[in-house]
Image (cartoon, rainbow, N blue to C red):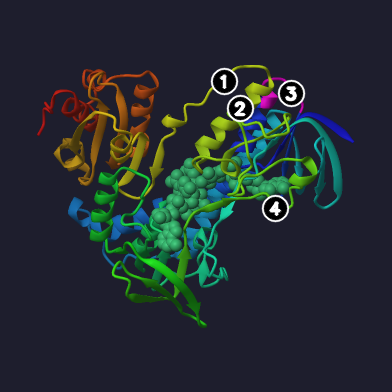
């Protein structure tokens, strides 16, 4: 039986990054993955394929609707080849997952394919093509998550689907009914809207992306409505029925009246749940909480000291970069270092167009906590860069402490804000004030100028270009 310093279970962004950091720190490391390809949800059926389809569908929509305005005329019909679009997406995924194989080889990490299952707190069997048993001084559980559903919904994965099926459709739905106006519902909803589907989003709360700043929900709703997405907010879904080619979703509207939506597909995107099936947690003595998440302390240690857990399978935001930070932190803790994660500064992004990006506290959170704050907002449409590209929707909003001016939250909607948010993360990591941001030179013309202008608005209410 081979013995390792560290055995990492699960090869998503949490697991594979953790394995690399363990190997960098000189530990003999094994990585166990139940599927044939590495990369987990994010690379195979999450971040990467969804962004590939968002990009492809964006090109399609631009070519159909926006190129003419730039003086580019297309003779003949702009046609969709969905099979080719999906093939490209699969190619992007394959290229990315192969990159992880390369990284594992480069770092001399031994990879096992098969379901890892604890026999006791130091032994793991791997049931793949041939069963193998390995032992470890330390374990890092990074088994991720699976789509959640509602108790009365049967996910048949044909008409009533999750994000996984929505990323590999063989036809564009006529009417896609989406339950849940969170990140997945909006990103994939926008993909199929652009490709020609009628899209209806049925959301339980009174706004979409309900955990983000209210101003972002409002702006994104406005823009997506303009693009033709229909929203049914404060709707409580009661049932989903399927016939051969149709799906009917029934819900109670805000007045308590029953309404129904008939579509050919229903995407259920009401969140994800931690995945620990078959892992043998009981045999290892590892505890989970009432939500099924593996219980960990501030050092991501389970109740069994040498077994750690990271990423989607533990508490906190279900984001690839959060999983990666936790993977690095655990590797460094095992190596005796003293790393730290500032969870307040893990940015959140929705990759619709315009993009939505946030870091720190929302205005709603500051109000609830009774924090005195200042707010400054600057619209993208006032920027020369936005007018040049035609991406005029959105804003940058900056919240800073009323007394000290320290940045408390930065919230953006607009072109390329997924990348712009890094400036806010850096500034907040160094505990900058809004005035610090306002006094830094931002290249002209760029979307980043909106950050400077919003900071000027927050500091002394003196933006320059509005
Ligand atoms: P996962 O990536 O889920 O990986 C877990 C791995 O463990 C899987 O490969 C699984 O097969 C394996 N495994 C499970 N049990 C066992 C076992 N017993 N033995 C062996 N292997 C096992 N996040 C972002 O930050 N940005 C995005 O743009 C983004 N887009 C997304 C789009 C979609 C459609 C979805 C569904 C998710 C998206 N996410 C995004 C979320 C992101 O994918 C997750 O937060 C991230 O993958 C979590 O990483 P992880 O390492 O914890 O787990
Ligand atoms: P989510 O938590 O983002 O959104 C779920 C939505 O469903 C919420 O708006 C919620 O109010 C709503 N909802 C819950 N129960 C409902 C009900 N009964 N009826 C109607 N609406 C209901 O979850 P998701 O969109 O499924 O995504 C899952 C996870 O994947 C998220 O945690 C997210 O962080 C991650 N993800 C991230 C990205 C990204 O970073 N760009 C992209 C996709 C997914």
In the image, residue 347 lies at what x, y percent?
41, 35
* x, y percent for residue 43: 56, 46
Q: Residue furthest right?
A: 1
Label 4 within 8 A of ligand 1 by Cβ: yes
Give the CA distance from mark 2 to mark 4.
24 Å
**Mark 1, residue position:** 339
Query: Does any portion of residue 187 appear in the rendered image?
Result: no
Mark-to-mark CA distance, 3 and 1: 17 Å
Task: Tell me whether the residue at label 2 lies in contact with that at label 4, contact meaning CB atoms closer than 8 angstroms.
Answer: no
Q: Position of residue 268 (x, y in %)?
A: 48, 63
State the extent of the magenta-drawn residues as a range: 22-28
Q: Residue at x 56, y 68 (%)?
A: 155
Q: Which residue is at a point 61% across and 33% down the rendered structure image?
A: 17
Secondary structure of the residue carrying tag 4 is: loop
Camera-nearest label, 3 or 2: 2
**What's the mark number on residue 299?**
2
């Amino acid at each position: 039986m081979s013995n390792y310093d560290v055995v990492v279970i699960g090869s998503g962004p949490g697991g594979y990054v953790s394995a690399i950091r363990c190997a960098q720190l000189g530990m003999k490391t094994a990585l166990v993955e139940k599927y044939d390809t590495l990369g987990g949800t994010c690379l195979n059926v999450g971040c990467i394929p969804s962004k590939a389809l968002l990009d492809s569908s964006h090109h399609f929509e631009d070519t159909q609707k926006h190129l003419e305005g730039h003086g580019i005329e297309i003779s003949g019909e702009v046609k969709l080849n969905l099979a080719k679009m999906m093939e490209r997406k699969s190619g992007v995924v394959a290229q990315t997952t192969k990159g992880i194989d390369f990284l594992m080889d480069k770092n001399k990490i031994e990879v096992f394919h098969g379901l890892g299952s604890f026999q006791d707190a130091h032994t793991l069997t791997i049931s793949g093509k041939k069963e193998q048993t390995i032992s470890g001084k330390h374990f890092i559980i990074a088994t991720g998550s699976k789509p959640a559903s509602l108790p009365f919904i049967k996910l048949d994965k044909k008409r009533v689907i999750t994000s996984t099926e929505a990323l590999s459709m063989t036809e564009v739905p006529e009417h896609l009914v989406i339950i849940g106006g969170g990140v997945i519902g909006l990103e994939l909803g926008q993909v199929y809207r652009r490709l020609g589907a009628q899209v209806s989003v049925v959301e339980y709360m009174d706004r979409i992306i309900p955990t983000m700043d209210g101003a972002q929900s409002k702006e994104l709703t406005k823009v997506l409505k303009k693009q033709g997405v229909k929203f049914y907010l404060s709707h409580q879904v009661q049932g989903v029925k399927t016939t051969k080619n149709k799906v009917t979703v029934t819900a109670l509207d805000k007045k308590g009246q029953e309404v129904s939506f008939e579509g050919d597909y229903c995407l259920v995107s009401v969140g994800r749940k931690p995945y620990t099936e078959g892992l043998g947690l009981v045999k290892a003595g590892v505890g989970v909480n009432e939500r099924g998440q593996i219980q960990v302390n501030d050092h991501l240690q389970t109740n069994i000291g040498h077994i750690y857990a990271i990423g989607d399978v533990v508490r906190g935001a279900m984001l690839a970069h959060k999983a990666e930070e936790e993977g690095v932190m655990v590797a460094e803790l095992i190596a005796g270092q003293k790393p730290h994660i500032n969870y307040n500064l893990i940015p959140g992004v929705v990759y619709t167009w315009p993009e939505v990006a946030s870091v720190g506290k929302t205005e709603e959170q500051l109000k609830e906590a009774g924090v005195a704050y200042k707010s400054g907002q600057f619209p993208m449409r006032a920027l020369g860069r936005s007018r040049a590209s035609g991406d005029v929707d959105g804003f940058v909003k900056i919240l800073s402490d009323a007394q000290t001016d320290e940045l408390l939250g930065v919230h953006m909607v607009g072109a390329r804000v997924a990348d712009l948010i890094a400036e806010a993360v850096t500034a907040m990591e160094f505990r900058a004030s809004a005035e610090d941001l306002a006094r830094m030179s931002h290249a002209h013309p760029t979307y980043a100028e909106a950050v400077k202008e919003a900071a000027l608005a927050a500091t002394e209410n003196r933006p320059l270009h509005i």
